[in-house]
Each structure stands twice: as C-alpha cells, then as structure tokens.
Image (tube, grey):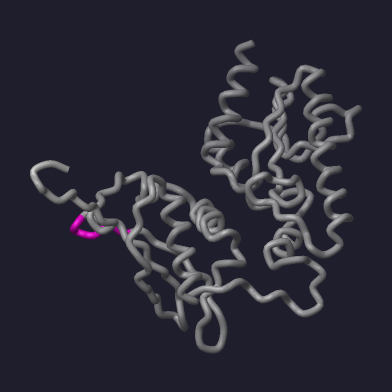
Amino acid sequence: MTGGGRAAVTRVDDRRLPERAWKAPRGRSRATASAEQDRAAGGRHRRIVPVEGGEAQGTVELRRRASGAVHAYLRWTDRGQVRTRHLRAVDQPSRIRNLAVGWEHARAEGLVRDAARPEGSWASSPEVRASMRGNRGRDTAPEMRLRSMLHARGLRYRVSTRPMVEVRRTADVVFPRVKVAVFVDGCYWHGCPEHYRPASTNSEFWRQKIEGNKQRDETTNRLLGEAGWTVIRAWEHEDPAAVVERVARAVRSAGAG
C-alpha cells in the first residue's frame, strides 16, 4: 500500500462469476439435473425440506442478479405452491461447488434435514436403503437413458448379454462385431470412490460384499481385455451424454481397426 491509500476489498456480492460457475448446461435431462443436486447435497436423502404435515424434496438454484453477483436459493413445492428462500451469495469457481455451498447453508439454517430412517429398516442410512431398493439386474434408469441416447446416435447393440459365452459375465450394452462391452455400475454395489459410503449395520459383511464385487469387476476387465475386447465402465451418476461420447469413440475406433 502506498501514499496512505486503503487496499480495495472485494466482497462476495461484488464478484462476477463466469457462466460455467452458475448456469446449468442446456439440453440436459431431468435425471441428470437431479443427480447433480444429489451430488451437491451429499445424497438424495439430504434434500428433505420439512413442510406442514409432511416433507418435500428441495432444489438449490443459482441466479445471477443485475449486479452480476450470483446467489443461491432453496426451492421446493408445498401443497402445490412453489416456494423459494434466499440462502446466500456464492463465489466458487464451479457450479457444483456453488450448489454445495448453498446446500451447506440451507442445512446450517435448519431449512433442510436428512430423511428419517424407516422403522425396522436394516440399512445403515436412507441413502444406502434407496440404493439397495433401486438395484436391479437390468433395465435400471441409467442403463435405459444410455441405451436411448446410443440408439439416437444410430448405434445398434445387444442388451444384457455375455460378451463371451465362456465367461460368466453379463454386460449392459454389447457391440459384438467390434468387441466393445459397456457396464453401467451402481455407485453403492461397485464401491464408487465418490459416492460410496460404508454401511454401519453389518459393516463387515457389506465391506466384504463390495470388495468382492470390485475384484470381480477387475477380473472381468482382465478376461475381456485379454480376449481383445474394449471394456467401458460408467458410474450411474455420470452424465449419460459424456458416456455416449466415450462409447461412440470406442466403437468407431474398434470398427476402423
């Protein structure tokens, strides 16, 4: 500081963030938007807004004001009426981090809470319970979205079949001619490093179960790779559009070879 002047102080409300730090991408699906909120909140079970006579599922929205500052708002529906509550100004460099700040503030203010654990449920948390209930052998929502988008790209494939008859492994999407196998892995059952949370009930049993699944995945990758297959694994939380691009590139590359 020179000449006795005072250093300029930049407040959060003065900062103008780039659009990528607050604006949602165009054309994304409702499922992708919901998955983004789940990730920012720390799980779908953490998005509960108490309302009179029950509860609602909340959403954090990011809006840029005329001043250029970006603010987070909590949004929910109560008896058919859309409600919003201002949370705070945000200044993180990415959209997901700004959403997370909004959720943290909403929780600190007591505006949201975790879903209650159902009486008699053996799952360690509402998130684990939802994951286990949602687990199916085939035709899960992430698989259906991926298959629909692949088909729209003109790609044709087989569904829920073994890439190799002699190897007892079923892939979710298979391109037999070019030997590309796609697996859509559930975050809980396959030990996602981003979303997996160890169970607190019967913890050793579930730890061994998940570790066994991860080892089986590694063995599957190795067996198919040794036989000349390209293996693509996608987490259920991934943006399906990004997964489609990965699959399309692998199919084109394998076909060109």
Q: Residue furthest top?
A: 257
Does any portion of residue 225 appear in the rendered image? Answer: yes
Q: Quadrant of residue 250?
A: top right
Where is residue 109 shown, x and y percent of the image? 46, 74
Where is residue 9 shown, x and y percent of the image? 22, 53
Q: Residue at x 51, y 75 (%)?
A: 49
The number of discs equals: 0
Residue in front for this viewpoint, 183 or 217: 217
Residue 16 sits inside the magenta stretch:
no
Query: Along the horizontal axis of the image, is 211 left or right of 242?
Result: right
Q: State the quadrant of the N terminus.
A: top left
Q: Residue furthest bottom?
A: 53
Q: State the quadrant of the C terminus.
A: top right
Q: Residue at x 75, y 48 (%)?
A: 138
Query: Along the horizontal axis of the image, is 47 left or right of 193?
Result: left
Q: Residue furthest left?
A: 3
Where is residue 200 shown, x and y percent of the image? 79, 63
Chief SS of the magenta region:
loop
Up-down relation of residue 250 to residue 87 (above or below): above
Where is residue 163 shown, x and y percent of the image? 80, 29
Q: Quadrant of residue 230?
A: top right
Q: Residue at x 50, y 70 (%)?
A: 107
Does any portion of residue 26 appear in the rendered image? Answer: no
Q: Residue at x 78, y 28 (%)?
A: 221
Residue in front for this viewpoint, 216 or 4: 4
Residue span colored magenta: 63-67
